[in-house]
Amino acid sequence: SGGGGVPMKKKKASAESTSIAINESNNNNVDNDNNNDEEDDGLVRPKVGAPMPNGRPSWFHVPAPSQDVASRYQEVKESLSDLSLHTVCEEAQCPNIGECWNGGTGTIMLLGDTCTRGCMFCAVKTDQKPPEPDPFEPFKTADAVAKWGVDYIVLTSVDRDDIADGGAGHFATTVELMKHKKPELLVECLVSDFRGDEASVETLAKSGLDVYAHNVETVERLQKFVRDSRAGYWQSINTLKHAKEIKPDLYTKTSVMLGLGESDEEVIQTMKDLRSVDVDVVTFGQYLRPTENHLSVVEYVKPEKFEHFKKVGEEMGFKYVASGPLVRSSYKAGEFYLTHMINKERKEKGLD
């Protein structure tokens, strides 16, 4: 099966089979005026097999990763391979892998490379019974990060609904070991919703991490089309709320994909909902379809629109808004702005 738990089509799939898939995806909607992705209320939603916009715009060109044996990209890749670690950069086919890894930034994915959920935008492979987590992974991760010599690291994971605490304890141990090796290291954990379990959220919030990140992914209306049924808009927002309640000086962060049929008003309402629970950082990036078995792109959002949302978010009081077509939730891992912001604020508060 492919990412999102969708059976992969065979390579020899014909134009006829593709047409059948599109017709099935559209169900009984027979509107032929190119608005067949609209709901009854006139709003648009994404579908698997729906027509894609014609060609990617020019602003999506990024340099390929350097294959030079002396490049930072190769150094990071080899150290991860040697320690049998995974990164979301590779598993989710991030377009910024060359830029980030050559800059010494990577996002390590804990708890294996197989997710128990099937979101319709994600390329990570899925299974209801993934292999057991590696109990030595927290130690390997701490060793890898120490070798990289970075000041800011992002830890993330697949969803592990098969584990009682969703993997929160595994994360907490990893954070504690990294902080033991390098106390000044800033650690961001981009985690699942832990099925809304507040005890799991608390375990991680108290682990010593600096940034608690969890992605709402899309606007409220599109949740059921984009995310696994076990996820939910308010379940996600409430985990961010609880993390902040447990540790008020913790930075909270989330990410939203654009280009899935959302309206400007829905994006702004999402920002209002996030600020209502004091989320500090939000990122906006363009949704890119990983395979033809995933949701089609509804729209390639123009850079000017991303800049508009950045301005609106800053006016709402977010401490930092990253917004652009190629921005991802851990894009550049906050290496520059977040590191400076956190250290500056802590110094002002006398916490350093």
Image: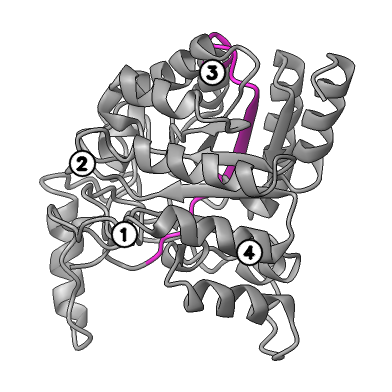
Q: Which residue is mark 3?
A: 274
Q: Is residue 102 visible?
A: yes
Circle nearer the N terminus (1, 4): 4
Q: In terms of sequence position, does the residue under pointer 3 or pointer 2 come before the other? A: 2
Looking at the image, do the residues carrying marks 3 and 2 touch, with CB atoms under 8 Å apart?
A: no
Q: Position of residue 143 (x, y in %)?
A: 57, 61
Secondary structure, mark 4, is loop
- The colour mode here is one colour
Please give the label number shown on residue 163. 2
Q: Are marks 2 and 1 in contact (CB under 8 Å)?
A: no
Please tell me which residue is depicted at 53% across the width and 69% down the height of the picture. 55
Q: CA distance from mark 3 to mark 2?
A: 28 Å
Residue carrying label 4: 96
Q: Which residues are magenta?
A: 274-290
Q: Residues within 10 Å of mark 2 (few under 14, many from 20)?
A: few
State how far apart marks 3 and 1 are (Cα).
34 Å
- Amino acid type, mark 1: Asp
Query: Does label 2 or label 1 sit earlier along the sequence?
Result: 1
Q: Which quadrant of the figure has residue 150?
A: bottom right
